[in-house]
Image (cartoon, grey):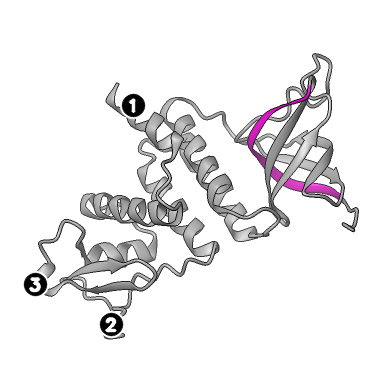
Amino acid sequence: MSIRQRIEQQPSFVLHSYPWRETSLIVEMLSRDHGRVAMVAKGARRPMSALRGVLMAFQPLRVDWSGGGEVKTLVRAEWQGGQPLLQGRALLCGYYLNELLVRLSAREDPHPALFEAYAAALAELARARSPSPVLRRFELALLRELGYGIGLDVDADSGEPVDAGAHYLYIIEKGPVAAGADAADARAVSGRTLLDMARGEFERAETLQQSRDLLRRLIHHYLGGQPLESRRVLKEFQEL
């Protein structure tokens, strides 16, 4: 039998919500200390509900919930403010981050550092001219925090530090290996790119391009080849 619990004043963000029954919502929350939590917000769709205008994506909340099953009961949610609203391309990028979290993270698997990385990414998206470096830093943080062991600065075969002047092929679930004669392979990345990624530096154009391609390949692998809806929408937005 599941143990009932009451959690109070937990820093959280809404990742996704959808209607449930006539007046309620099922909400996927990212909480700081309890990871991704599903909960029912009873009556949240009623016009006079105190939750109706609070359960907004990308806004910091303090949340109380109770229950011991897979889906908890949302008791209270308070808006904390301080986060500018995302608009345009930044808004679509925010939905991309949310979809990654829903698709890749397990429920009730706490990752406080990932919560902080997400909050920081939202703040940066609100003011960044180019969201690409923000997305790359978050993708790396996500994969590392979820235990996928993304090694970048050591050759997985030789154990030697990555050489900034060399080229490498990144073998999924192993790491970078010297490309040698395969340096012209479209998947090859420069050692400089790998070292930049390890430091979280994405200012160089080559680093930004190669890291995007590499991280896209890694995420595609860990999603089991399933496409991301938010990526499709973002691509269409960019084409327009």
* Disc with the residue nearer the chain's start (1 vs 2): 2
Q: Amino acid at mark 2?
A: Asp
Residue 181, which numbered label? 3
Closer to the camera, 16 or 32?
Answer: 16
Instruction: Judge from the rendering whether residue 145 lies leftward or rightward of residue 132; answer left or right.
Output: right
Residue 14 included in the magenta stretch of the image: yes
Distance from the alpha carbon under mark 2 to that under mark 3: 16 Å
> Relative to residue 166, is residue 114 depicted above or below?
above
Q: What residue appears at the point 40 percent right and 37 percent down from the top-left corner?
A: 231
Let me know if residue 191 appears in the view.
no
Instruction: Judge from the rendering whether residue 207 lies leftward or rightward of residue 145; answer left or right.
Output: left
Distance from the alpha carbon under mark 1 to that under mark 2: 40 Å
Quarter of the image where one finds residue 33: bottom right
Q: Where is residue 34? Give x, y as percent.
A: 73, 55
Kindly state the secondary structure of the residue where label 3 is placed: helix
Boundaries of the magenta span: 7-21
Q: What residue appears at the point 44 percent right and 25 percent down from the top-left corner?
A: 88
Residue 151 included in the magenta stretch of the image: no
Q: Amino acid at mark 1?
A: Glu
Closer to the camera, 90 or 1?
Answer: 1
Q: Amino acid at mark 3?
A: Ala
Q: Residues within 10 Å of mark 2 (few under 14, many from 20)?
A: few
Q: Which residue is mark 1?
A: 236
Residue 157, which numbered label? 2
Q: Where is residue 163? Give x, y as percent.
A: 21, 75
